Structure formats: C-alpha cells, structure tokens
Image (cartoon, rainbow, N blue to C red):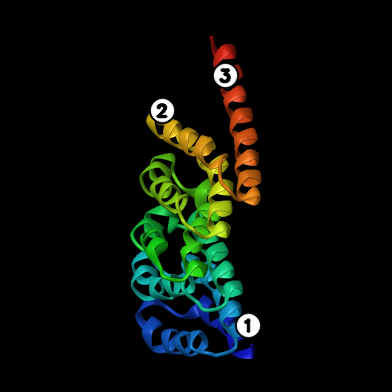
Amino acid sequence: MAAVASFDPVIKVVGDESLTQSVLPALTRLFGNTNWRVRAAAIELFPAFAKTFSEQAFAGAFTKFCESWLEDPVYAVREAGIGCIKQMMGSTKLGYKWAKESVVKKLAGMTGHKNWLFRIVPLVGIEAWIDVTPAEEVEAVFVPVILQLAKDKVVNIRIAVGRCLRLAEKKVKEAKTKQALKELRAEMRKDLDQDVRKAVAAATSSAEDAEEEEDNSNNKAE
C-alpha cells in the first residue's frame, strides 16, 4: 500500500516523456499483485493521471489497465474500476469520447462471457455510466446489451436488466427505442422468477413516472 501512496507526488512532476520509464513499470507490478486491496488502491490514482497527462499519453499508456479492471477476478476490484471510469468520463478531459473506443467497447464485448459473474459486468457498467453517457450512445451501445442479456438464463443477470431498464427508458429519446424497452418490460413482467418481476415492476413504476413528468412538461410548453 505504501507503494501506491508514493505515486501521489510523482504524478505532479513527471511528464509525458518520462511516463513509460517512471510510472508504467510500477503500475504493472501493482496490478500484478495478488493482494486485491493493492489493485483496488492503485485504481484510485487514475483520475489524477487523467488530469495530469495528455489525452494521447493517457490513452496510449493507461487505457489497457482500465480495460483489465473489468475482468479482474475479484468483484470489489471490478466495482472500484467501474466507479473510477465513471469519474474519469464525467470529470476529466477524457470524457465519453475516450471511453467509447476502449472500456465501453470492452464492456459490450463481455455479454458472451462463459462465466455469468463477468457477463453481468456490462449491466453494472451501464448502471454506473449511463448518466455520463450521451443519449445517442445509450441507444446505440447500451440498449442492445440490455436487450441481449434480458434473455440470459441466470436470474441475477435478469434482475440487473430490470434495474437498467428504468435508467435506459429515462435516457433514450428515439420513439422506436423507447417502444422496444417498453415491450421488453412487459415481457419481463411475466418472468418465472419473483425477484426478476419485482425488479421489472420497479422499472415500470419509474418509467411511468418519467412518462407522466414528460407529458406534464409538454403540456406546460403548449
């Protein structure tokens, strides 16, 4: 843990030119550490890296670490990584543009993973990132993931789909996409598992509230 803390003063003075020599080898060692707490602590450095180094330097040197968090064998590390990526998407110069070609693409590619513990990661990511993601990207990338995983045989994944449904319906703008999500909601309300039905019922209530709020706004505008 001391090794992680020692980076704090370094990132304030090291430049892009000495990036590889001074930072990357140590990060490689940290993320190769068998202690998951060390890996989770190292993740906390990345928002500072994103603010300190140029976009090009960060994308070229650090993105590979960000992508690796999504497949870490320990859930706490995956969760910490998703939270850190959200922070970098929303409060640094990287924004969604960086994430789109790296971690978001990686996330979408995990829907076919053999292990459901990793198949659910895209839904955890969607829940976390949807409010810092443009509506058109939610429609183009996140909604297809939701529709695909809604058919998963694992109950926990379908429950996570239910949670994502209400967030997606609030975010998307296209009528066709809204209708597809609404139809999925109706279908999942008939799920054989009670917990899935509860999750979808919560999504239904939230979606109806959003529709009512939108109608009221439109009426005021008229």
> Quick one: label 3, few (<14), some, or many (20+) residues within 10 Å?
few
> Quick one: label 2, few (<14), some, or many (20+) residues within 10 Å?
few
Dot 2 falls on a residue whose secondary structure is helix
Task: Tell me, yes or no, if residue 103 can be seen here.
Answer: no
Dot 1 falls on a residue whose secondary structure is helix
Tell me what residue is drawn at x 61 percent, y 79 percent. Answer: 41
For the residues marked 2 and 1, what is the alpha-carbon distance in whole angstroms? 45 Å
Which label is found at residue 184?
none
Q: Which residue is mark 2?
A: 175
* Quadrant position of the N terminus in the picture: bottom right
Amino acid, disc 3 = Asp
Question: Farthest residue in the top direction?
Answer: 222
Task: Tell me, yes or no, if residue 88 can be seen here.
Answer: yes
Q: Which residue is mark 3?
A: 215
**How many circles with numbers are drawn on the protein?**
3
Q: Which residue is mark 1?
A: 37
- Of the numbered discs 2 and 1, the one sitting upstream in the chain is 1
- Picture coordinates of residue 128, whole percent (x, y): 56, 55
Dot 3 falls on a residue whose secondary structure is helix
Front one among 127 and 132? 127
Cβ atoms under marks 2 and 3 closer than 8 Å: no
Amino acid, disc 2 = Ala
Tell me what residue is drawn at x 45 percent, y 57 percent. Answer: 93
- Picture coordinates of residue 62, whole percent (x, y): 41, 74
Tell me what residue is drawn at x 52 percent, y 71 percent. Answer: 46
Vertical side of 29 occupied by 140: above or below: above
